[in-house]
Amino acid sequence: MNNFQFYSPTEFIFGRETENKAGHYVKKHGGSSVLLHFGGGSAVKSGLLGRVKASLEAEGIAYTELGGVKPNPRDTLVYKGIDICRENNIDFILAVGGGSVIDSAKAIAMGVPYDGDFWDFYSGKDPEAALPVATVLTIAAAGSEGSGDSVITKEEGGLKRGAGSDLIRPRFSILNPELTCTLPAYQTACGATDIMAHVFERYFTNTTEVEITDRLCEAVLMTMIKETPRVIADPANYDARANIMWAGMVAHNNIVGVGREQDWNSHGIEHELSALYDCAHGAGLAVIMPAWMEFVYKHDIMRFAQAATRIWGCKMDFAAPENTAREGIIRFRRFLRDIGMPLTFDELGAKTDDIPALVDKFGLGDGRTGGFVKLSSEDIASIYRIAADPKLI
Ligand code: NZQ
Ligand code: ZN
């Protein structure tokens, strides 16, 4: 196992009706003037925003509203948010929504105390300060409620890029599984795919002797395999929603990934798709991650065979483990198909003609990237081509 540091300062408040405590926790964490940040309307329609506002008012906390965050959140709203925070002496940002709202809140949080362009943090610079951020989560997916990451799309040029810092880990996150019951089945499935992808990015590693994190990864994946079809069939199933919501946090605050090399190429390759086509990140991953697996599995057949047997319950073919490895990838695609995810470029609405542009935007040039298998630009093009025409399906 590799050396590691693990810092997860977020206070989680989990369960029914916990959004009514938002004001209490803002006060506890030092907020007195809040930017209330939300998305395109689901939180307004469900009455959630009203309840959060009432709880802030009950604590005497002033707030300024900024809604309108789109999925795949844009830089333009971040600039607006930074201006609003400065004008109103905001000292705390409360994101009410999914990964997109939370990521936009994190970007604003880094931008407010910074003299330069906040995009610098999405181009490799480390922030030195950030306003405190907290969340009321409405979709189990990105894991941003417990992560130090944020992903923003620059409208000009359609660049989707990530920033990471412990400074933007949420101070608290309110996780009420009931809030996710209004999600359409497609968004639920996109979220489930993202959660599983966060684990697979960590599971496929060259680091040996990492039994504890292997087993934690398997637990999260097997939970998702059991619970996702339950909520698709019965959207109001609180217990299934609750298990998925916590799995989404555990999948991405890095507790399942410490001490091991991680890959993350599927995410980078997918981000170009959601930047170009504005598709849901989870749907893009359903197309890309199995394609990536199909491309790399020969690098470590036994690890893929282990995944197939332990996670998907495949029978080990001791004479030809490669068959078991391949069967695991087929089972993953079958699962994604069953929960309503696209599996191919066509089904996602992506075009093979765009592959050169996608590779170009990825921006790797002659370099290589990835923790499990180091990919070249040509390899990435091959993965897009597999995604257009998968074989292990
Ligand atoms: O805008 P509203 O009206 O709220 O609608 C949203 C949105 O259309 C809707 N929604 C959310 N909660 C709902 C609901 N509809 C009904 N009932 C509810 N309870 O769902 C749609 C998708 O929301 P979004 O926030 O975009 O979803 P998600 O949480 O999947 O976030 C996706 C973004 O996170 C990034 C992705 O790239 C993408 O931009 N990621 C962020 C990460 C991080 N910060 O750590 C890691 C991830 O790998 C990911 O890249
Ligand atoms: Zn993701």
Image (spheres, grey):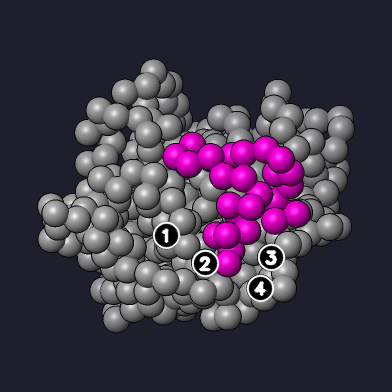
Q: Amino acid at mark 1?
A: Glu
Residue at image mark 3: 355
Q: Which residues are magenta?
A: 359-385
Label 1 near label 2: C-beta < 8 Å?
yes
Query: Within the magenta stretch, is there residue 229?
Result: no
Query: Within the magenta stretch, is there residue 375?
Result: yes
Residue 63, percent across and down?
68, 50
Compare marks 2 and 1 and give the one earlier in the sequence: 1
Compare marks 2 and 4 and give the one earlier in the sequence: 4
Residue at image mark 4: 352
Residue positioned most to the top:
3
> For residue 250, which numbered disc appears in the image?
none
Residue at image mark 1: 294
Residue 112 lies left or right of residue 347; in this view the side is right
Secondary structure category for the residue under label 2: helix
Q: Amino acid at mark 2?
A: Ile
Residue 219, percent across and down?
23, 49
Secondary structure category for the residue under label 3: helix
What residue is rendered at 59% in x and 63% in y?
384
